Image (spheres, rainbow, N blue to C red):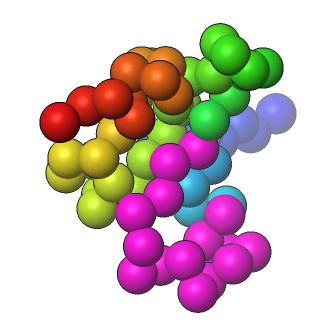
């Protein structure tokens, strides 16, 4: 039985961009969990350059300078 595997970096972000291509020019972060314990699980390149840190809570990301 053949088996294949593929790795798509930041797959949740890629899925959002496929569904909503107008977001391509913006910083996008995908969160997981229930408030107030949400964590950033995926970011695109522009969000990762200085806006959001992966696996940090929403509060910690919003309070960064």
* Residue at horizontal 55 percent and vertical 77 percent from the top: 23
Picture quadrant where residue 30 is located: top right
Locate residue 28, reporting x and y percent. Answer: 48, 58
Side (left or right) of 44 relative to 64: right
Residue 22's place in the image compared with 54, above or below, is below
Which SS type dominates the magenta stretch?
helix
- Outermost bottom residue: 22
Residue 8 visible (yes or no): no
* Residue at horizontal 68 percent and vertical 16 percent from the top: 36
Residue 39's place in the image compared with 26, above or below, is above
Residue 58 visible (yes or no): yes
> Which residues make up the magenta segment?
16-30
Residue 22's place in the image compared with 17, above or below, is below
Locate residue 24, reporting x and y percent. Answer: 47, 78
Q: Which image quadrant: the C terminus?
A: top left
Side (left or right) of 62 relative to 45: right
Side (left or right) of 36 relative to 14: right
Q: Which image quadrant: the N terminus?
A: top right
Q: Is residue 62 magenta?
A: no
Picture quadrant where residue 61 is located: top left
Between 37 and 41, the one nearer to me in the picture: 37
Between 40 and 3, the one nearer to me in the picture: 40
Q: Is residue 19 magenta?
A: yes
Between 8 and 59, the one nearer to me in the picture: 59
* Residue at horizontal 62 percent and vertical 35 percent from the top: 31
Locate residue 49, reporting x and y percent. Answer: 19, 51
Side (left or right) of 42 relative to 31: left
* Residue at horizontal 67 percent and vertical 61 percent from the top: 15
Locate residue 53, reporting x and y percent. Answer: 32, 31
Q: Give the number of callouts.
A: 0
């Amino acid at each position: 039985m053949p088996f294949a595997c593929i790795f798509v970096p930041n797959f949740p972000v890629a899925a959002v961009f496929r569904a909503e291509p107008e977001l391509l020019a913006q910083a996008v972060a995908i969160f997981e969990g229930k408030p107030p314990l949400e964590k950033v699980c995926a970011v695109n390149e522009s969000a990762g350059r200085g806006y959001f840190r992966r696996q940090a809570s929403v509060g910690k990301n919003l309070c960064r300078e």
